[in-house]
Amino acid sequence: MEKIEVLIIESRSSEDIYKDRSEGLKLKDVLKLQGISAKYFEVIDKRFFTKAIKYAEKSHIKYIHFSGHGAAEGFALTNEFITWSDFDELAWPHLKGKCLCFSSCNIANGVEDIFNYHKSFCNAVIAPTRPISWGEGLVAFSALYFRAMSFKTSSDQDIRVLNHIVGPGTFKFIPSPYTSATYIVGKT
């Protein structure tokens, strides 16, 4: 059985559906060409979004990619808006240990709020600081996943590549403030 490395969750607006615009399915196809295994879910409301998030708990999934419209206050599903507080209620603790990637406008300007609810909500978030087009997101995240799965690079290096592709400062890497500590108990 193939181990899924990237889970793509897409929620398009009514207009996107009508005009047949989709980033997520195209990203899945590009990843397949690169030899990266991805699973795609299209969701329209909280019920289906929650089901997709629970699927993300599988241990072999490293990246959760959300493709949809966003703002500093949260992101849009087809039929409703999810604030960071809503997101915490729907997703905690299912994304713990994962890297969360948003291909959604302006998300980096508010997504850090998720760490106010749970410092270990996820390992890190990669998100844009400005409005981006579907094409910019597709090209940038294709490069990110290719580098992250194919090379021994740091997250900082990968984000620099994303920003080189679509413009300086477009993407931001936001690590979790949570750091685990391991203590060794020895004989005295």
Image (cartoon, rainbow, N blue to C red):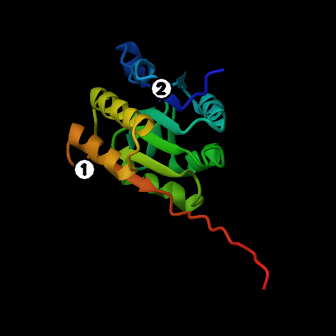
Pick the residue in front: 175 or 24: 175
Task: Give the secondary structure at mark 1.
Answer: loop
Query: In the rendered image, which residue does mark 1 sit on?
Result: 169
Residue at 29% x, 41% y: name it.
162
Q: Residues within 10 Å of mark 1 (few under 14, many from 20)?
A: some
Pick the residue in front: 109 or 65: 65
Q: Position of residue 16 (x, y in %)?
A: 38, 20
Q: Position of residue 136 (x, y in %)?
A: 27, 31
Horizontal side, residue 161 vs residue 89: left or right: left
Relative vertical location of residue 152 with respect to residue 179 in this rendering, above or below? above
N-term mark: 1 or 2: 2
Pick the residue in front: 134 or 32: 32
Q: Position of residue 100 (x, y in %)?
A: 49, 43
Residue 129 showing in the rendered view:
no
Query: In the rendered image, which residue does mark 2 sit on?
Result: 36
Task: Give the secondary structure at mark 2.
Answer: loop
Relative vertical location of residue 88 with respect to residue 37 in this rendering, above or below? below
Q: Of the residues shown, which amino acid type is indicated by label 2?
A: Ile
Residue 60's tag is: none
Q: Residues within 10 Å of mark 2 (few under 14, many from 20)?
A: some
Horizontal side, residue 130 vs residue 8: left or right: left
Residues under labels 1 and 2: Cα distance? Answer: 27 Å
Residue at 52% x, 37% y: name it.
64
Q: Of the residues shown, which amino acid type is indicated by label 1?
A: Gly
